[in-house]
Image (cartoon, rainbow, N blue to C red):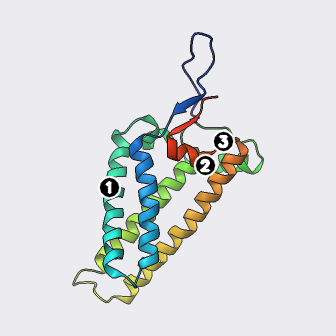
Amino acid sequence: MERLNFTTDAGGVPPASVKVWDPFVRVFHWSLAGLFLLAYMTGDDIVKVHIAAGYAIAGLLALRIVWGFVGPPHARFSAFLRSPRAVLAYLRDVVLLRAPRYLGHNPAGGAMIVALIVLLIGTCTTGHMMTTDAYWGSEMLEDVHEALANLTIGLVVVHVLGVLVASFEHRENLVKAMITGSKRGA
């Protein structure tokens, strides 16, 4: 489990806030949310915008995957990926209102990141395939593409609910933290 370990000032008091989310992670998060919403809303209606948003999402995902290996500690996959058993134990503790607070991503948040990345890669891949000669007009591929996008919407809803529950349980505004980059120190 990630410990909440802080450097204290001369009086031994932990800092009021700690920088957790670096600028890249924050810009990635909000850009991805906006681009996915744009792609989802334009769909078949404004195809050029839909395709451009899809390619931008693919580029963001590639950058985030690299950042997950070379970025600062809280951005790295090694900092927040946990076993399925640890994720389930954490979710049990959430239900029992005794989940520990994490400075970075909690185990459920880490699992959500992986699930969203996988679904979005699948959505981008099938979307790109539909623009190629080999798969142009494939209804089956279009159905898979739409199913992946709809599953992503479902995960986004679960993600937002998880953020709200964690914010309530730990009395911490996690949306604000993803805007400012800082979380409560203690």
Q: Quarter holding the C terminus?
A: top right
Q: Residue 123 — which label?
A: none
Determine the residue positioned at 31% across, 67% down.
55
Q: Give the spatial CA distance, label 1 vs label 3.
A: 30 Å
Looking at the rendered structure, the secondary structure element under dot 1 is helix
Q: How many marks?
A: 3
Question: Which residue in the rendered view is the most extreme toward the right?
Answer: 96
Q: Residue 62 — which label?
A: 1
Determine the residue positioned at 41% across, 72% down.
39
10 versus 47 height, above or below = above
* Residue type at tag 3: Glu
Q: Is residue 95 visible?
A: yes
Q: Is residue 82 visible?
A: no
Looking at the rendered structure, the secondary structure element under dot 2 is helix
Quick one: label 1, few (<14), some, or many (20+) residues within 10 Å?
some
Determine the residue positioned at 60% across, 29% down.
185
Q: Earlier in the sequence, mark 1 or mark 3?
A: 1
* Residue type at tag 1: Ala
Q: Nearer the viewer, mark 3 or mark 2?
A: 3
Q: Report which residue position mark 2 lands on.
A: 87
Give residue 4's position: percent from left, percent from top. 59, 29
* Residue type at tag 2: Val
Q: Give the spatial CA distance, label 3 vs label 2.
A: 21 Å
Q: Nearer the viewer, mark 1 or mark 3?
A: 3
Q: Residue 172 — which label?
A: 3
